Image (cartoon, grey):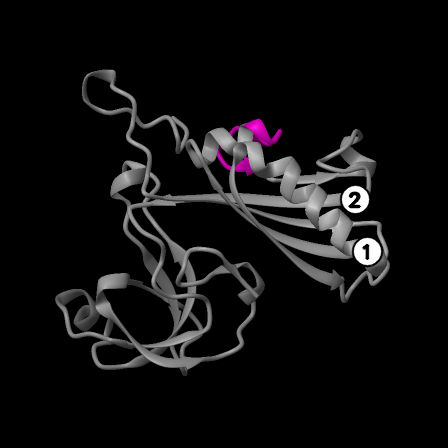
Amino acid sequence: MTHDDLSGRGGQPVPLAPYRLVWLALWAEATPQEEAELTEHLRTALAPHGTVIVHARGPFHRTPEMLHYEIDLTPDGSAPDCMRALGFTRNADSTWNDEWERPVNGGVFLHPAVYGALAGEMEAAAAPRFRTGDVVLVRDSPDTRRLGLAGAEVTVGTPEYDYDTAPARRTWYYSVLVEGQDESENVDETDMEPTGRHEQVYGERTSVSTNGVLAS
């Protein structure tokens, strides 16, 4: 069973999750002077799939001859259906074959200038409240007492959810980084309170902001 093959009672279709996101990172062989035109092309090409926000990031720091784009797409249908419509497929273990590279895959992805792409999807009952690097206060609960984290301040890592839960019912938990510990712990979103502080941590470029779009 794949993550998106969950069915409702009596074989009824699964209701769409209120929060749906397909994110894309693109690298294009283009000059800064071509950035605005390419941005508009990408927005137009993806518009049939849903609501699109294109973030033009300029020359990529590792390959400055390429422009870097980050795209947030709220699909009209389910996020997995949107991924498939964009040409991405599942691996045998149900994870996404989420990379496209012109020299490897051939053809064109959205625009002839696009050299490489990375994609992913999320579906849940609501957008995550926290993003990678947020410093939060852990509330007192049986779970946090068991972890020895009640009352501690921790740094949020990656947002996660239980894939076996129906998309519309999924809630978030986070891996959290605890000062003085090598291993991270998982804490439910309901057991966290914001402090308003933020730290730069590894992986922040692919985190999700509080309004449900990618943050960098």
For the residue labelled by badge 2, is the local secondary structure a helix, a strand or a loop? strand
Badge 2: how crowded within 10 Å, few (<14), some, or many (20+)? many
Chief SS of the magenta region? loop
Disc on res. 66: 1
Q: Residue at x 54, y 36 (%)?
A: 96
Residue 62 visible somewhere in the drawing = yes
Q: Quadrant of the C terminus?
A: bottom right
The structure residue drawn at horizontal position 45% and vertical position 62%, both measured from the top left corner, is 209
User: Which disc number belongs to residue 4?
Assistant: none
Question: Which x, y percent locates residue 128?
Answer: 36, 58
Q: Residues within 10 Å of mark 1 (few under 14, many from 20)?
A: many
Assess whether residue 163 is covered by the magenta stretch: no
Q: In which quadrant is the N terminus drawn?
A: top left
Magenta segment, which residues?
Answer: 85-96
Quadrant of res 45: top right
Which residue is farthest top? 10
**Residue 196 x/y as whole percent:** 36, 80
- Label 2 with label 1: CB-CB less than 8 Å: yes
Please give left or right for residue 63 compared with residue 75 in the image: right
Question: Foreground residue, 17 or 172?
Answer: 17
State whether residue 3 is above or below residue 53.
above
Give residue 53's position: percent from left, percent from top.
56, 51
Among the two numbered marks 2 and 1 on one chain, the one whose residue lies closer to the N terminus: 1
Tell me if residue 84 comes above or below residue 71 in the rendering: above
The disc label shown at residue 115, or none: 2
Type of residue at label 1?
Met
Residue at the (31%, 55%) spot, across then down = 172
